[in-house]
Image (cartoon, helix red, strand yellow):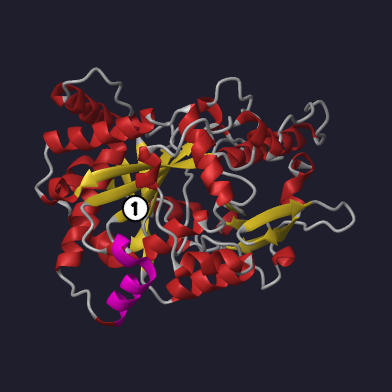
Amino acid sequence: MAIEDFPILAGRLRQVQTGKLEVVVDSDNLNIPKFTEIQSSIDFDKYEAANFNPALLPTGAVKPTAFLRGGFQEENIKLADICIVRLKDCGGVVLSVSIAHAVVDGYGFNLFMHRWAEINKKLVADNTATDLGVSNVVYSRSILQKAVPTPQKPCLSVLHNMYIPSSYLSRLFAWVSPGIRGTIFDSIHAFADISISCFHVSRETLDQLRQSVKKNSSTNLRISDNDVLMAAITIAYAQSILKHESERTNTGLASWLKSAFLGSSSKNPKNFVTAEAADIRHRIPNGNLENYSGNSAISMMVHSPIELLQIPASSEALTQVALGVRKSTNEITSEYIAQSIHEAESESDFVFRPLVHNTFVAERMMVTNLSRFTFYTTDFGWGIPQFVGPVNAKFPKFTWFYPAHPSKGGIYIHLNDYSNILQQMQTNSFWTEISDFVY
């Protein structure tokens, strides 16, 4: 029933031109989401004692990939993959839901989960799903295209710094089909030692960090939790990366590939780049995008001097990086949005450039902040979740901010990366001072 409100999840991908996809929903040829159930040998108490580490789930319960898969023909790719893991002795269930980023972003994912839970809760209560009302979710990208203004100026200087140069690899990935592209990316990282770690930053610590930044700032800019968290993870992660890089020799085939595919953009970077997905729904005046479930995120780039990050962390360094985050956030104006969307839709390999860049350039990280999403009000009829978080996507340098359970408060930081980098993070003195290791 939830799929009826989100029919795009039963659509089929079609590549209409290089780097461009469309989703076709044919009622006579639906692409029904994959649904599986798996029995686990562990009970809820053991899973809870392990802080809900997804590594304990049975093989097949999670889909460790950041890319579309399902064969070389894009129309065979499932846009939604759902797995229910039943814990031992009927102790509970783990719901693993994977939806293609090509059709929803985090906001749209949250809309779907709430609608599904709303329907199921009604069925649990009285075995009927009547009187639920009509869903007003909109998935057609045309509503976004109508809301985004036309660029009025030449490309802003801040966008010049944001865009990553095109490369042989990014153009290749734009040319091949989504299935082949996913297979290639999965193969690149299949044998890499990539895992996921989770850290918890308490509400008290967040407040202390914000107060420290305000105290050391000479401006009257508003400082948010996101500004502080982005600054903190940038400092700790950059220090971990730089320490790791200083202990290895970047020579041979890897160095040649890095230079050949990325050119000068990969040589001796002066800045550490933290890229964050910024939702534009509430940033377009009268855009009426609150019911849009598709992708409406653009990239926000924060450039922090590597020289600043090489010294021991301090309140002054945290303040400088946090103010850089705030400055980048404030630059997301209507014109910035218009130019970002225009560039993304005019350059066929635009979305693949950061993926290629991320693979070869150490001084870079991607962040998605989901900490404001109402995951813990998603009730299927048996109460709210005990834990919500991502699984190992098998792709490095990805970080997610998730809300912690209401009884705990604060924010979970999930970091997907190479195991040796995660080990550096777990011993970074600044990071261990402000966060607790979860798994």
Residue 264: within the magenta? yes
Instruction: Between residue 49 and residue 327, name the one nearer to us.
Output: 327
Locate residue 255 relative to residue 300 in the image: left or right. left
Q: Main secondary structure of the magenta part?
A: helix
Q: Pinpoint residue 227: horizontal percent, then vertical percent.
A: 31, 33
Instruction: Between residue 334 and residue 439, name the one nearer to us.
Output: 334
Q: Secondary structure at mark 1?
A: strand
Q: Is residue 301 above or below residue 280?
A: below
Residue at 80% over, 34% down: 129
Q: Pinpoint residue 439: horizontal percent, then vertical percent.
A: 34, 55
Residue labelled with disc 1: 365
| Neighbour tally class for label 1: few under 14, some 14-19, many 20 plus, Cα within 10 Å | many
Instruction: Between residue 186 and residue 392, name the one nearer to us.
Output: 186
Considering every residue shown, the one lying at the far right of the view is 28
Regarding residue 202, the answer to whether it shows in the image is: no
Residue type at mark 1? Met
Residue numbers of the magenta segment: 253-265
Q: Pinpoint residue 213: horizontal percent, then vertical percent.
A: 19, 28
Considering every residue shown, the one lying at the far bottom of the view is 252
Instruction: Between residue 17 and residue 42, name the one nearer to us.
Output: 17
Give the total of numbered labels.
1
Residue at 25% over, 51% down: 272
Quadrant of the rendering where the N terminus is positioned: top right
Residue at 61% over, 28% down: 290
Residue 136: within the magenta? no
Locate residue 259 relative to residue 299 in the image: left or right. left
Q: Is residue 358 above or below residue 400?
A: below
Q: Hey, which quadrant is residue 406 in on the image?
A: top left
Q: Is residue 232 above or below residue 397?
A: above
